[in-house]
Amino acid sequence: MLNFNIRGENIEVTQAIRDYVQKRVGKLQKYFGNDVDSIAHVNLKIHPDKTAKVEVTIPLPYLVLRAEETSPDMYASVDLVTDKLERQIRKYKTKVNRKSREKGYKAIDFAATDETVAAADNDQDDKLDVVRTKRVALKPMDNEEAILQMDMLGHDFFIYQDAETDAINIVYRRNDGRYGLIETDDNQ
């Protein structure tokens, strides 16, 4: 069963909005089956320029679904984000079932129909082909130098070796323009 946690930023979540979100996002329940209990975390936000941003995160036992969409209309944003989530589910199901068939495992059964699988097989964005491979020599440096290197290269992320810990880290540019750091766990 899909439960909802709906929050609003710069907007009061009215019963009409709550009902619409539950109706639209609740349609995704057909893909999960009745044995899956999860909470759909929905964040509704109105920006100063009057655009509406909708973020939905649904943690499931086998994957985390997440999508966000911004448009001039709150209801349109909910529709667009639901469509994105549905594409993610179909893509994941197709990929997992294809790998299962290749390796001889039993396919994972979502509660989807065969026409859903056929539609996902026809999606062009299912191709996850690696089109280029790069090798990099990791230079020991600190976070600030890694961010400068990333900015000089014009990339959205940069992999480097931390000078103090010798761990492999990644700095990246977030959607809000600030920077994030991913540290690897060396306890393996």
Image (cartoon, rainbow, N blue to C red):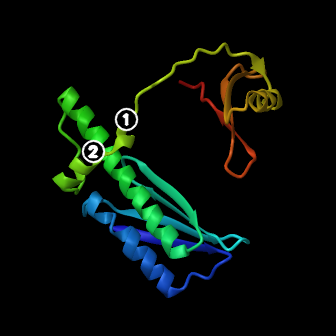
Q: Earlier in the sequence, mark 2 or mark 1?
A: 2
Task: Identify the mark at residue 42; answer none if there is no mark.
Answer: none
Q: Quadrant of residue 85?
A: bottom left
Q: Residues within 10 Å of mark 1 (few under 14, many from 20)?
A: few
From the viewer's perspective, is 30 left or right of 148?
A: left
Mark 2 neighbour density, 10 Å: few (under 14) some (14–19) many (20 or more): few
Residue 130 % position (x, y): 45, 25
> What residue sits 47% from the left and 62% below the top?
81
The residue indicated by pointer 2 is 122
Q: CA distance from mark 2 to mark 1?
A: 10 Å
Residue extending farthest to the bottom is 15
Q: Is residue 88 above or below residue 38?
A: above
Q: Is residue 96 above or below residue 66?
A: above
- Specify whether 29 is left or right of 7: left
Residue type at mark 2: give it. Answer: Asn
Residue identifier under label 1: 127
As drawn, 43 above or below 19: above
Picture coordinates of residue 64, whole percent (x, y):
44, 50
- The x and y percentages for residue 13 are 57, 81
Task: Give the SS element for disc 2.
Answer: helix
Q: Are marks 2 and 1 in contact (CB under 8 Å)?
A: no
Question: Which amino acid is tagged 1?
Answer: Lys
Rendered residue at 22%/56% (across/down): 112
Q: Is residue 126 above or below residue 169?
A: below
Residue drawn at the location 70% of the way across and 23% of the way down: 160
- Residue 26: which quarter of the image? bottom left
Horizontal side of residue 2 vs 112, given as left or right: right
